[in-house]
Image (cartoon, rainbow, N blue to C red):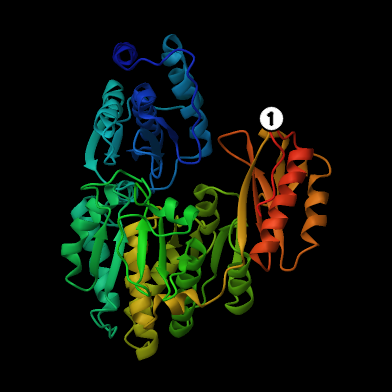
Amino acid sequence: MAMFDEVSKQSSFHSKPEGLCLQYGTAGFRTNAKLLDHIMFRMGLLASLRSKKTKATIGVMVTASHNPEEDNGVKLIDPMGEMVTPMWEGYANRVANAEEGDLVGVLKEVIEKEDVNMSQEASVFVGRDTRSSSAKLSQAVLDGVSALGGHSKDYGLVTTPQLHYMVRCRNTQGRYGEATVEGYCKKLSEAFIELTKNANCTDDQKQLSVDGANGIGALKLHEMESHLKKELHISLFNDGSTGKLNHQCGADFVKVQQRAPIGMLVNPGERACSFDGDADRIVYYYTDPEGNFHLLDGDKIATLISTYLKQLLTQADLHMNMGVVQTAYANGSSTTYLEDTMKVEVRCTKTGVKHLHHAAQEFDLGVYFEANGHGTVLVSQSAEEEIQRLAENPGAGAQRAQAAHLLQNTVNVINQAVGDAISDMLLIEAILAIKGMTVQQWDAIYSDLPNRQLKVKVADRRVIDTTDAERRTVSPAGLQEAIDALVKKYRQARSFVRPSGTEDVVRVYAEADTQENTDALAHEVSLAVYRLAGGVGDEPKPLR
């Protein structure tokens, strides 16, 4: 076929360094930008095949999220704006790593296995972040799409969640919204204004400081501001005009370092938040009058949102099954509060947003957040229809109608395709305004248990095998028993270990009643891993 001659010809302009092997991780391919040109071209090819297979528009986002400026990456977006399926992640690995002469053969295998109709038209949306390498790399994606005769739309500079949103809008024939940045800004901001119009907020309460991580989120938040009509006063820091992307700023830095980003001026008690480099994560924080730093991460966000939704469902007298999806990294206090106080079902999944998203789809309202601040709310179609029927029912009564109206606008401020820092920020701000809550009152809903994360270097991380959503190990022999015995020594204690997805290290998580006990437990579990799972280098040292 002439099409494959064109693929071979174009591939020679995007040649693969011999012997280089990269793996599609939890969020696509990610490494130094200089090594990615061939990967981008090939993901353009694969996105075209996925589009032909699904008879839908597929997205390709060029970003490396919270990685340093010199890195870049790419992730594929499926028809409803979700992450690509595991089967196609496997194809991505094969296509990316095929040696030059084998590329066409590998593509033909995918076409045959998936029974792809090559005469079906392909449609691919492409977006990129603000890295200096992104423009050239996104062009390589566009070259890949056109090599297989596909149609592409280049959105240029967009946040990752915005591209997910565009794909969902296109594949729902506009029912979800208009597939433009302007349409995104209008839908979210109009819903936010409707939600907050009855809240009695002073100008001080409408004030929010935002750390844009010197990335695309700062640029797009600036575009959103004009739509918000002064209903939210944003002070934007790390907007990319001077600082370096993700350098000592952004959600990942704040979460890991437990301190405010550089270049941010926030007075004690004022609320602030940080986006990550591609604006799909958010964390909130403040400092108290004594100068202590308080982080409100994904667990606190999930708790605030689910408490608000549960109260609205009760007021609307709507009987829907609502659940919160967490990972093993969720703070034990948040799980206890949700289950025991709020009486909300909590489900635990393996680490990785795709696992949480999938589990959240099983509820009428599924709230999911990783502790790192990546998350959203999923609302089933039947739940949306039921909310709409109630909102339009003249005999519903004032309280039920008001709750239904709030639920409708809440659904419209949410980006259901994927975690979205801008959307999550607007939802959180609306909830705080409606409830008349300060950031301190939000923080006081429950107190986090002290926790500690450590890494242990091992010869081969594959010796660790886990079960029960990564909360227990099944190999090597004796490790889980050792962890169980150590946990029993401390109050309110919990610990688990899991292999890293990217390097030969084992990640250790521990929590207990005090920081001293937590650190002691984390160290003892690290020693058990080192001794039973083939630790390399020096034995882990105590933290204190």
Task: Say which quarter of the image contains residue 148.
Answer: top left
- The residue drawn where x is 45% and y is 57% is 373
* Front position in the image: 329 or 514: 514
- The residue drawn where x is 28% and y is 77% is 196
Query: Up-down: is 284 above or below 443?
Result: above
Is 123 positioned to the left or the right of 223 in the image? Answer: right
- The residue drawn where x is 49% and y is 14% is 19
Q: Amino acid at mark 1?
A: Ala
* Front position in the image: 500 or 92: 500
Is 541 positioned to the left or the right of 263 in the image? Answer: right
**Position in image of residue 50 (x %, y %):** 40, 33
* Front position in the image: 72 or 176: 72
Quick one: quadrant of the C terminus?
bottom right
Residue 114 visible, this angle = no
Task: Say which quarter of the image contains residue 58.
Answer: top left
Quick one: quadrant of the N terminus?
top left
Residue count near mark 1 (Cα–Cα under 10 Å), binned few <14, some 14–19, many ≥20: some
**Position in image of residue 165 (x %, y %):** 32, 51
- The residue drawn where x is 62% and y is 33% is 504
- Say what secondary structure mark 1 lies in: loop
The residue positioned farthest toward the front in the image shown: 544
**Position in image of residue 523 (x %, y %):** 70, 51
In this figure, which residue is indicated by the disc labeled 1?
459
Residue 526 visible, this angle = yes
**Position in image of residue 230 (x %, y %):** 18, 72
Task: Say which quarter of the image contains residue 429.
Answer: bottom left
Q: How many marks?
A: 1
